[in-house]
Amino acid sequence: MSSLDKSIEFITPQLDQIAKTDPSERNAFIIGVSGPQGSGKSYLTQHLVSRLSSIYKSINIVGMSMDDFYLTRRAQKELSDENPNNPLISGRGLPGTHDLPLLIDALNRIIQRAINWQIPRYDKSLFSGLGDRSPADEWLVVDQSPIDVVVFEGWFNSFTPFDNESELLIRWKKIVEISPSFVGIERENVIFLNNELERYLPVWNTFDTQIILKTNSVENVRTWRLEQEHKLIAEKGMGMTDEQVQAFIDRYMPAYYLYYEKLLNNNSICVGKTLSLDISLTRQVLGSALI
């Protein structure tokens, strides 16, 4: 069974209850989807929205991505310029490079069943692959029908920070010992990352349920991300070179090594049910578990 079929099987009993509820009395239902870059989470999210919408025609279901809430190109450049010695935030991607007030406002509007507003979109192909927020006329319009269900995807969805700074630094020291390429990343940069990640906890707290794509090696991200960029270039006619992609991924790896194992060990603050899907390098489902 595919990750999509497994996810449909997991979600439909929960949406059945929403379908039985009068539209005026519904509460918004937020589904978190977490998976490493290139693992298929965007594909899963897109097709989950499509399949669920065809099953539940009376439910307004939309997809959202953490990526759509990146800082604007100008704001990202200002952040990088203000932190010239922190390579982790020299470009978009990691905790700290998103417009969290904009994201939390969007989630609050969804929870409050707001109408007549827009969800931002982000175009990664702009500025030769550096990306920028799309013009407002390209944003997703929420008209007279409030959103009932959101499928919200992100590569570090439900990652949780270390509560203790000494524990964080002990973990980082062990990572550097086995991954010499991280030697140039200062402990202050890692502390900054951990502090920024804590600011995302209110986002994770909105998840009513979640789906997690698990891989046996975070290094699979390198293969997947290259495939992803090649597809983007084919579709948009522009994007990053392979060398730029590798440099791009290098910035992400410290976060994977710090926090991904915690997530796999069920260290999540989602109060609802979690579907965990083990996937191979070719994105085939190897096993699943309900948590």
Image (cartoon, rainbow, N blue to C red):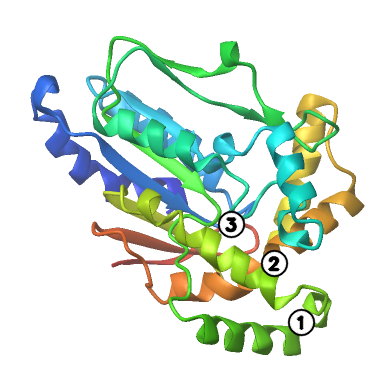
Which quadrant of the structure image shows residue 223?
bottom right
Query: As rendered, which of 219 and 112 lies closer to the eye?
Result: 112
Q: CA distance from mark 2 to mark 3?
A: 20 Å
Cβ atoms under marks 2 and 1 closer than 8 Å:
yes
- Comparing marks 1 and 3, which lies closer to the viewer? 1
Q: CA distance from mark 1 to mark 3?
A: 25 Å
Q: CA distance from mark 2 to mark 1?
A: 10 Å
User: Circle 3 sits on which residue?
Assistant: 283
Q: Secondary structure at mark 1?
A: loop
Q: Is residue 197 left or right of residue 179?
A: left
Quadrant including the C terminus: bottom left
Placement of 43 over or under 179, stated as above or below: above
Which is more N-terminal, label 1 or label 2?
1
Query: Can residue 2 be spotted in the picture?
Result: no
| Coordinates of residue 85 in the picture (x, y in percent) | 80, 63
Binning the other alpha carbons within 10 Å of mark 2 as few (below 14), some (14 to 19) or many (20 upward) gives some
User: Circle 1 sits on which residue?
Assistant: 179
Quadrant including the N terminus: bottom left
User: Circle 2 sits on which residue?
Assistant: 253
| Coordinates of residue 214 in the picture (x, y in percent) | 51, 65
Placement of 24 over or under 144, stated as above or below: below
Placement of 63 over or under 3, stated as above or below: above
Amino acid under disc 1: Ser
